[in-house]
């Protein structure tokens, strides 16, 4: 009888641990989908900043006088403070994307909590403060959600991955067409430093897709919004 009771308690705790994360993901996805079909587009970048690609993206956004959202890894943000400062100074939204990009479903609760809650100093105060949170891989649990609440950061997901991490890469035209047909949404791209074969090709894909989306938005008269709005 005691073992059965313990088993039930463990099952309830496990269900609560993952269930709260699944519910939060569902709500965040619903907010992201609210941008679809009404000419609102949020262009977002995860896993940066990098001194190379991020600065190139910022140059492109400045050319179009457009704004985007950058979800930054804590360790990488600390290593590239000048890039973080530029993101904020040029009017883009600074987002939190965890300390070390751990999958919240694959690490123990202590590591999950520390990765979610340990906001670095550069993202805590002043113009470079993070104002929105995106969990790594979109995975959340009870502690992830609690950390976001304590940090007072809304949770943002996406409606369309760019495919810049896929093998093979999709065509830029296919991604743009899908977003055009959807009438907007939240686009997920990545601006981390890529090493190894194919890195330059993926960086070029991100830049080409960003330019194409900015041009699409301009042609369609869409409103570019922050991930906070989704």
Image (cartoon, rainbow, N blue to C red):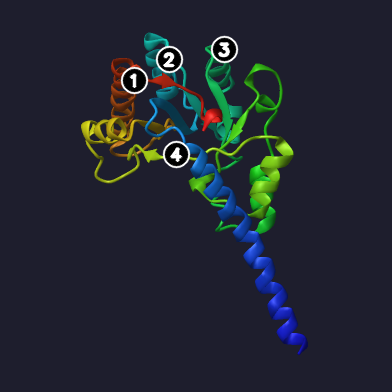
- Helix, strand or loop at disc 4? helix
Nearest-to-viewer mark from 4 and 1: 4
Circles 3 and 1: CB atoms closer than 8 Å: no
As drawn, which residue projects farthest toward the bottom?
1
Q: What is the distance, in whole Å, between disc 4 and disc 3 at their CAs?
A: 29 Å
Q: Which is nearer the N-term, disc 4 or disc 1?
A: 4
Q: Which is nearer the N-term, disc 3 or disc 2?
A: 2
**Is 39 in front, or is 55?**
39
Figure check: 151 above or below 70: below
Label 4: how many Cα within 10 Å (few below 14, some 14–19, many 20+):
some
Residue in view at x 52 percent, y 12 percent: 90
User: Badge 1 is on which residue?
Assistant: 217
x, y (%) of residue 228? 56, 29
User: Badge 2 is on which residue?
Assistant: 66
**Is 183 in front, or is 150?**
183
Q: What is the distance, in whole Å, between disc 3 and disc 1 at their CAs?
A: 23 Å
x, y (%) of residue 155? 58, 39
Q: What is the distance, in whole Å, between disc 2 and disc 4 at their CAs?
A: 21 Å
Nearest-to-viewer mark from 2 and 4: 4
Label 2: how many Cα within 10 Å (few below 14, some 14–19, many 20+):
some
User: Badge 4 is on which residue?
Assistant: 33
Q: In this view, does 203 lie to the left or right of 154?
A: left
Q: What is the distance, in whole Å, between disc 1 and disc 2 at their CAs?
A: 10 Å
Residue in view at x 21 percent, y 31 percent: 173
Nearest-to-viewer mark from 1 and 2: 1
Circles 1 and 2: CB atoms closer than 8 Å: yes
- Helix, strand or loop at disc 1? helix
x, y (%) of residue 191? 43, 30
User: Badge 3 is on which residue?
Assistant: 89
Q: Which is nearer the N-term, disc 1 or disc 2?
A: 2
The image quarter in which residue 158 lies: top left
């Amino acid at each position: 009888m005691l073992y059965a009771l313990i088993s039930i308690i463990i099952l309830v705790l496990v269900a609560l641990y993952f269930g709260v994360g699944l519910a939060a993901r569902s709500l965040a996805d619903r907010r992201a989908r609210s941008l679809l079909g009404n000419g609102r587009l949020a262009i977002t970048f995860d896993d940066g900043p990098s001194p190379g690609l991020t600065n190139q993206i910022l140059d492109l956004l400045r050319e179009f006088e457009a704004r985007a959202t950058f979800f930054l890894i804590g360790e990488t943000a600390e290593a590239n403070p000048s890039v973080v400062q530029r993101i904020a100074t040029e009017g883009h939204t600074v987002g939190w994307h965890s300390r070390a990009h751990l999958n919240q479903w694959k690490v123990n609760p202590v590591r999950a909590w520390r990765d979610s809650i340990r906001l670095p100093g550069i993202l805590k105060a002043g113009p470079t403060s993070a104002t929105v949170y995106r969990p790594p891989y979109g995975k959340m649990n009870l502690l992830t959600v609690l950390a976001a609440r304590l940090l007072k950061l809304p949770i943002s997901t996406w409606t369309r991955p760019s495919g810049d991490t896929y093998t093979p890469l999709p065509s830029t035209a296919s991604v743009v067409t899908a977003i055009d047909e959807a009438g907007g949404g939240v686009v997920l791209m990545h601006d981390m430093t890529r090493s190894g074969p194919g890195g330059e090709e993926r960086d070029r894909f991100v830049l080409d897709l960003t330019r194409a989306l900015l041009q699409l938005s301009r042609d369609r008269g869409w409103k570019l919004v922050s991930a906070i709005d989704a």
